[in-house]
Image (cartoon, coloured by chain):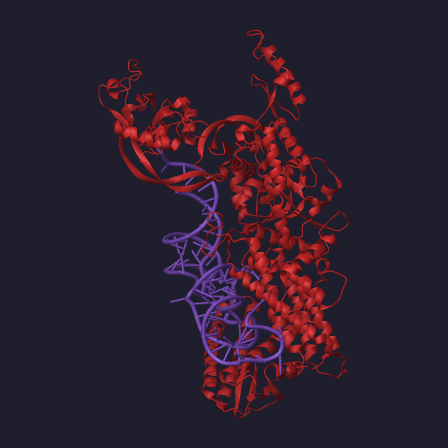
Chain colours: A red, B purple
Amino acid sequence: MELPKNFDHSNAEQRWYQHWLDKKYFHSEPDDREPYTVVIPPPNVTGVLHMGHCLNNTIQDILVRRARMQGKNACWVPGTDHASIATEAKVVHMLREKGIAKSSLSREAFLEYAWEWKEKYGGIILQQLKKMGCSLDWERTSFTMDPDYYQSVINVFIDLYNKGHIYRGKRMINWDVKAKTALSDEEVIRKETQQKLYFLKYYLSLEPGDRSQEPGNSSPDSLHTTHDYISIATVRPETIMGDTAICVHPDDERYKHLHGKFAFVPLINRRIPIITDEYVTMDFGTGALKVTPAHDMNDNQLGQKHNLEVVDIFNEDGTLNEAAQIYIGEDRFEARKKIAKELEEKGYLLKTEDYTSEVGYSERTDVVVEPRLSLQWWVDMKKITGPALSAVMDEEIKFYPSKFKNLYRHWMENIKDWCISRQLWWGHRIPAWYTPDGLFAVAATKEEAFEKLTGQWSIVNSQSQTEKPFLHSPFTIDDIKQDEDCLDTWFSSWLWPFEVFNGYSNPNNKEVNYYYPTNTLVTAPEIIFFWVARMIMAGYEYKGQKPFNEVYFTGIVRDKQGRKMSKSLGNSPDLLQMIEDEGADAVRFGIMISSPAGNDLMWDQASNEQGKFFVNKMWNALKLVRSWESRTTERPKDGKTECIFAIDWFENRLSEVRIELDAQFNDFRLSESLKTIYSLIWDDFCSWYLEWVKPGFEQPIDKTVYEKTVGFFEELIQLLHPFMPFITEEIYHLLKDRNDDLTVKQYPAITPADNTILSTAILLKEVITTIRDARNKNQLKPKDTIKLHIMTENKTTYSSIESILLKQVNALSVSYTSMAVANSITVVVQKDKFFMETTTVLDITSQKEQLQKDLVYLEGFLISVEKKLNNERFVQNAKPEVIESERKKKTDAEIKIIVIKESLLNL
RNA sequence: GGAACGUUAGCUCAGUUGGUUCAGAGCAUUACUUUGACAGAGUAGGGGUCACUGGUUCGAGCCCAGUACGUUCCACCA
């Protein structure tokens, strides 16, 4: 059969992926084999494949495919995350384009749209993973809002609440004014922002207890007989209406006379106390700080400490409310401009300075985050961290690279409570129920909640009966209402490693018992806290066991300028287009070859080229080997020996590499293992082995050699298969007709390599290279033949390789000599001399130069070795084997020097 | 402000317990080959004071201290 000139990747990819699916190779059922379980980090349902996914999933696929070929029961579970905020944003956007406002819809109607949207677009990313060749068990596809999963999330909430680990509390949170939802600290991105620092006058009240000067008159002059003021610096003049104190450092001499006095907030003239706290930095701004407990995290803490009034001046969309008194309804940043102008006009503004500071932005909507007081649901994290810290520190769960252990420890030791409520409809609705009077109960159903609330009601009322007969009015089941909010997305995905096997909804079922704990988690370091840490906690809390044995953190994919790949920068290539153009194998190769373990990778699309070239190289090797098939012959036993050595060598070389690869995989040095295989195929197999066994033009080939060669080729592509599944499966089937498939072919056992053969091959390669180099330098054409004379004490070694040598350096003959051969090119390799007899006129200067260069190096080397050996302290302190090796270096160098000197004399 | 990590060839990176046949690989580059699997190739070569300064040691790319630069994370001064 004639093979096409090139590999047709798109045809092969489709064909083989479908074939693997038809054969159910990726489907796993519990059996008596050792399991190898990986759960995919569930991409957002809204997601489309990007380079990060490409890296992450290629790595997982490599691990899973290798495990499968090692005889393990490999199970890779796919699925998606409902991604509450991101998905809701997309649905809202989609509705807006249709002219429908979310506010005009009931919760039920909105959710109907959302599900519709999810069904339509939600699976795109999973389809894209198929294009990459990912060997996922599609029958196990999970979704964080599947009915069972949903119920598990709710039950976990109830359970944690009942254990006292979840509470409801008013806390300062990061508020996204666009999405109108609370954000966790981790969802806030801090960016350096150019700002203005406004220096404002706060006029002083005359007497600390003077009530005659209450606000009411708008003119400062009417409030103050003098113009004494304290100046403060702020970047947020629009929040002054929320000020309830001014704070100075107790030791600040400038303000000691003001301790306990009062000042007036400009424009609204609220009278506020001047308090002292060491929190204030004396040398920043004016050393006096305006305290706005409702709108600043630190001010809030100060406010609590000093019992200050809290005046919240913002609506949930970031506009000013009535409490602000002025500019009601204006957006916060509009208000800032207007207030700044008014302050200036009325003489409150002393000056402004340019100022750069970090401002928090919402990761989801990119608006400036507003610190806001709000009633939210919280997880008391200290109560559930349990064994999660020690599991990682004691390496019961191993982190690769281990540097992330420190980061993890730091976070765990300083863990803060987790705000889990989100003001969204898309997600798991919080199972809390309220009476019209604000009593609440946590329960799975309304009926249960009603029962609990009735109980609470009677207790409360019986306690308060002495004072008031009904502290809370009576209510019916129809009066109670469920919490409107949903749970944070991560509150569902932290159950992922066991709930994909129904490990919570159906505890101790056969599957979860078999597959859990999972083996390897492959994820991005960015979500070590969001997800990894919380999965570990949930694992111990609900399974009493770690969720995975090891975590491999991939690097961040950056472009060649070192910038993170992102949509907004537009430096993220269209992955699917790339796969279509260059082939999935090339793309997988490209991302893996540039991916050092655990470090960020500078990815350049050019690295796909290397993958494409590699595919082409293997394709051509296939064509070469196949062209021999029809020319095989049985050879007499005393036939040529060159192939015997080549085969011996390659067998041992394969063993050697297998051992190497094992070590690399154990440390997740996947990029290196790909390089190892790449070089094994390109250099060892194509450049050396195939050249050594290649028959002359249109000559026959020994049948045994042919079969061995096909066998080697199979073993090579088997090693490569996890990295580049399509081209390897294709070659496997084109090498010869067969019924089995490479995807499930089991690796042979690892055998030790014979070092003698390996070192003979190294010698052989070195001799070939050196002679070729000498030919080059003496301007011999490739077609010019030579007669090779070898001067060696080790004839036996050379006899096994002399025929290869002859072929590889285009020699007519090889013979052994004990004397220098006149008029020849001389080279020295190790302890042996090679004389190349040629008819071409020789220029001996370059030879001489080379030999002299070698001589100088060797003499220098010898001196340094001798120096060392003559150093008494070295001989005393160094290990015996080190001294022994130094002695050997010395004698070797001495012999070589003699050989080279002789050669120089003969020139 | 605190911390972690990094600095090795033009670029991206390996260098495991200190031992001058360890200064490496892949790209890129140069010369020569339009040879019969492959020019998407072959053969061979050039290229580095291992960031800097000290120290420990018989011996340092590797260990220690400091400096500079870079990246990231955490906390943040209004």
Q: Residue at x 40, y 30 (%)?
A: A331
Q: Is residue A391 above or below residue A106?
A: below
Q: In the rendered image, which quarter is residue A856 located in? A: bottom left
Please give left or right for residue A705 compared with residue A569 in the image. Answer: right
Q: Residue at x 61, y 29 (%)?
A: A108
Image location of residue A16, percent across then percent down? 69, 58
Image location of residue A100, percent across then percent down? 53, 33
Please give left or right for residue A350 compared with residue A727 in the image. Answer: left
Please give left or right for residue A22 compared with residue A396 in the image. Answer: right
Q: In the rendered image, which quarter is residue A354 located in? A: top left
> Is residue A39 something one can see in this rendering?
yes
Given residues A22 and A683, the one toward you in this image is: A22
Q: Is residue A625 above or below residue A811?
A: above
Q: Is residue A550 above or below residue B76?
A: below
Q: Quadrant of the N terminus of chain A?
A: bottom right
Q: Residue at x 26, y 20 (%)?
A: A219
Please give left or right for residue A114 compared with residue A718 in the image. Answer: left
Image location of residue A873, percent across then percent down? 48, 67
Q: Residue at x 67, y 39 (%)?
A: A499
Q: How many marks?
A: 0
Given residues A868 and A538, the one toward you in this image is: A538
> Is residue A756 something one can see in this rendering?
no
Please identify the residue farthest to the left as the structure is shown.
A226
Please identify the residue farthest to the front as the structure is shown.
A99
Q: Is residue A221 above or below residue A533?
A: above
Image location of residue A871, percent across then percent down? 47, 71
